Amino acid sequence: MDKLLIAGGAPLKGEVAMSGAKNAALPLLTAALLTGEPLTLTNVPALNDIGTMLKLLAQMGVKVERAGDRVTLDAGGLDNSVAPYELVKTMRASVLVLGPLVARSGEARVSLPGGCAIGARPVDQHIKGLQAMGAEIAVEHGYVHAKASRLRGARLFTDMVTVTGTENLMMAACLADGETVIENAAREPEVVDLANCLVAMGARISGAGTDVIRIHGVARLHGAEHRIMPDRIETGTYLCAAAATGGDVRLTGTSAAYLDAVIDKLMDAGCDIELSRDAIRLKAPPRLASVSIRTAPYPAFPTDMQAQFMAINATAAGTAVIRETIFENRFMHAVELIRLGADIKIDGNIAIVKGMDRLDGATVMATDLRASAGLVIAGLVAQGETLVDRIYHLDRGYEKLEQKLAALGARVSRVK
């Protein structure tokens, strides 16, 4: 199993390009199921989760052609509407095939994703929405089995804001009979990116990016070409790494348009940030000031940046309070940060982080994707060597992490 060896203490400096967004790419790949014509996506990141989704689509009969960051999907030969546990268990986003399959094929059999290290992410909102659109659904032997001759438009209200739920129901509604209104919809930029692609395929969607999305169903969708948005979480992670190490970096191929909450907090910490149309430059002070955060659905502070900010607060001047409101069990990285010398107290969904003068390298274990990123940032700051175990989590969401960090001057290598 691969590990990441980091020799800390070097400030990050230089320029590096950001990749396409994992959380936009996954639903966009499943959108290919909605049409028998080719869908071409560019700026597709090379990540383990992307490979898993392509494998899942291929076993359903989708023809996949991949060249660099360009992927063409042709679901004209779709002949299998089953998403087996063997593939779904490794990636919860696999549930995104449910809506498109039912809408186009009239049937889907998708394994329940199972547990998650950072807390429950139930699919009941997906099921409830599809039932309201006329699907007959049974949950049996660990699978969601859905049938519908043709879905019909409906007014849908989700009990909680769910990104994948919004995306699944929006895709299903594109081929439904009549109008579907999704209330309490997720407002994330990735939802907007999916909507833009679906519109390019012939869908009629309005309101994406607000909490009410309207979809007028059409008889069929056609092929299209779409460029995936930059990864805002990858961008935020590299900004945090530069800030923590006292660095000066310029990130290209990205935008601050989706990162207002993160940019504001980094500026509160003392960073100087310059924004241009497709790049962000950050210059860090000699020592950061502590910043308190509270996670909440977009456009508030993202839960996927919480671990990275816990890491930068570990050596910042002052004491920070971090409130996690999205997922339970999302402070598991705190124990690992404490192994590096951080002063962190946990009380339920609140973490109190007192900044230390230094951290010391040690062996730590990643527990989930974003926790891994927080440990890497801490390792870049710590004196001596830090060994991060279980970095397969990182490979799910960060393309060429060690190469990009090395390009900025980090002393980091992948070891067996």
Image: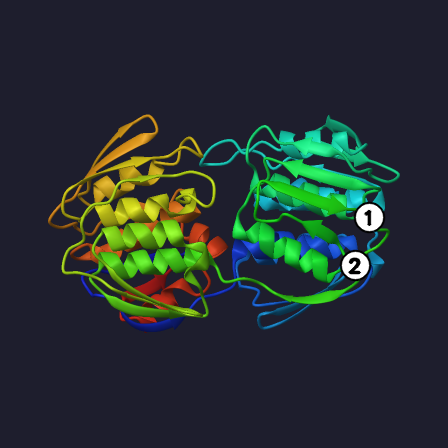
Give x and y (percent) for residue 166.
Answer: 63, 41
Tell me, yes or no, if residue 169 can be seen here: yes
Q: Which residue is mark 1?
A: 104
Contact between marks 1 and 2 (CB within 8 A): the answer is yes
Task: Please rate how many residues cluster around mark 2, counting C-alpha atoms within 10 Å: few if below 14, some from 14 to 19, many from 20.
Answer: many
84 and 265: which one is in front? 265
At horizontal 34% and vertical 36% (from top left) the residue drawn is 331
The quarter of the picture where residue 353 lies is: top left
Above-or-below relation of 289 to 45: above
Q: Which mark is residue 84?
A: none
Name the quadrant containing residue 384: bottom left
Left or right: 408 in relation to 35: left
Q: Residue at x 19, y 54 (%)?
A: 382
Q: Is residue 3 visible?
A: no
Q: Quadrant of the C terminus?
A: bottom left
Left or right side of 33 for 292: left
Q: Is residue 353 above or below residue 305?
A: above
Q: Mark 2 sits on what residue?
A: 75
Whole-percent x and y of residue 153? 79, 38
Name the amino acid type tagged 1: Arg
CA gap, disc 1 to disc 2?
A: 11 Å
SS of the residue at dot 2? helix
Amino acid type, callout 2: Ala
**Badge 1: few (under 14), some or many (20 or more) residues near its Cα, within 10 Å?**
many
Residue in the foreground of this view, choosing between 323 and 89: 323
Q: Position of residue 329 (x, y in %)?
A: 40, 32
Q: Secondary structure at mark 1?
A: helix
